[in-house]
Image (spheres, grey):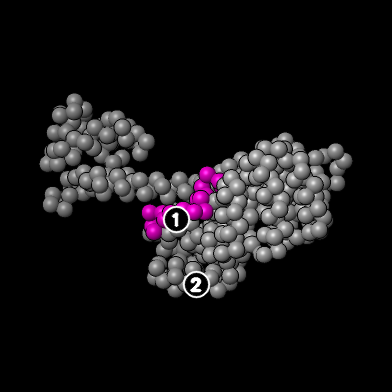
Amino acid sequence: MLDSLGLDRQTESIYRAMLGHPHEGSAELGRRLGLPPTEVHAAQQQLAALGLVSESFESPGRLRAVSPDLGLEALLARQSAELAAHQHRIEVSRAAAAKLISEYAGQADIPNSGIEQLIGLDRIRERLAELQRGIRQEVMSFAPDGAQTEDALRSSRPLDEDLLRRGVQMRTIYLDSVRNSSATIAHADRLTELGGQVRTIAALPTRMLIADRSLALLPMDCEDTSAGAVLLTGKGALTALCALFESIWEGAQPLGSARPKDVNGLNGQEAMALRLLAQVHTDEAIAKRLGVSHRTARRIATQLMERLNARSRFEAGVRAVQYGWLPGEP
């Protein structure tokens, strides 16, 4: 029953026996379960490594089972942290792949390669309007710039509303920071009323739009999205970018719901800020990644350092790993 937590059936039976008969030693437990003491001892060492067994204070040298409400909760928290770290590595890898695809496409000049370069904001908007008429089923997009400007919202509104009225499924992922922007919230509410779906997440790898899973629009330069864009239609690139979107969509939260907190009491934005803080990023870099002002980024960083009782960003990173707030890399 506990195999998903790393316990095989025999080890679980020994843990249960230790809970039910706390005063019995390895030999007694072995006789009770019909197992040699060596196997009982080996299982107890595994249980100790998982934090489910510890040395008795009352009888030094004797092992005792940690109560399930404490031991299993700690084990679940550890597995959750490891899963979050693993998921983060996957998303970083996919984001790096998306960036490489975009950069390569921006440099490529190969006829019939499935790559079209769009130079300048006017050309990008013009091409978007052209493409919009051909979209039939689905639009998926990342909006990583935080609170949207009135100009951007005004220019995108007619296109978005036309797609939704034609029955096109629309899924958009914004940054968590847009929850503090009344204009962006109003725009998102309008899309939702028309059948669109909107979620938010702490950080996004790049601006991206995918239409009908057959073409994708990405910036040539992630630092200056107005400079130019590339339109991709290659099957391999679209498969990777669709997978990137789906993985991030799965971890994002519906805009109308409260942002959940992890086992350490951190919401997604705080957890991402902590990760960037531990990597000794500046407040400016953190602000850009989270889509918030420089002042807000500094406030978040200061609050995290205070909670960790750290005097420097490096010390904050060290303490975060020690406390289990920031899983170390394997």
Asked whether 258 falls inside the magenta stretch, the response is yes
Asked whether the viewer can see residue 153, the reply is yes
Q: Closer to the N terminus: mark 2 or mark 1? A: 1
Residue 237 in percent (x, y) is at 71, 40
- Of badges 2 and 1, the one in the foreground is 1
Q: Identity of the amino acid at label 1?
A: Ala
Secondary structure at numbered mark 2: helix
Residue 106 located left or right of residue 160: right
Q: Amino acid at mark 2?
A: Arg
Residue 203 position (above or below residue 39): below
Relative horizontal placement of residue 90, taking residue 321 as reference (left or right): right
The residue nearer to you, when weighing 2 against 206, is 206
Q: Is residue 63 above or below residue 265?
A: above
In the rendered image, residue 230, in percent from the top left (x then y), is placed at 77, 49
Task: Kindly report the secondary structure that dominates the magenta region of the rendered protein.
Answer: loop
Residue at (85% x, 38% y) in the render: 112
Which residue occupies the extreme top position in the image?
A: 34
- Residue 286 showing in the rendered view: no
**Residue 30 forms part of the magenta stretch:** no
Q: Residues within 10 Å of mark 1 (few under 14, many from 20)?
A: few
Magenta part of the chain? 248-265
Q: Which residue is mark 2?
A: 299
Q: Quadrant of the N terminus?
A: top left
Splitting the image into 4 quarters, where does residue 221 fall? bottom right
> Within the image, what quadrant is residue 286 found in?
bottom right
Residue at 47% from the left image edge and 48% from the top image edge: 84
Vertical placement of 243 versus 306: above or below?
above
Query: Residue 258: which disc?
Result: 1
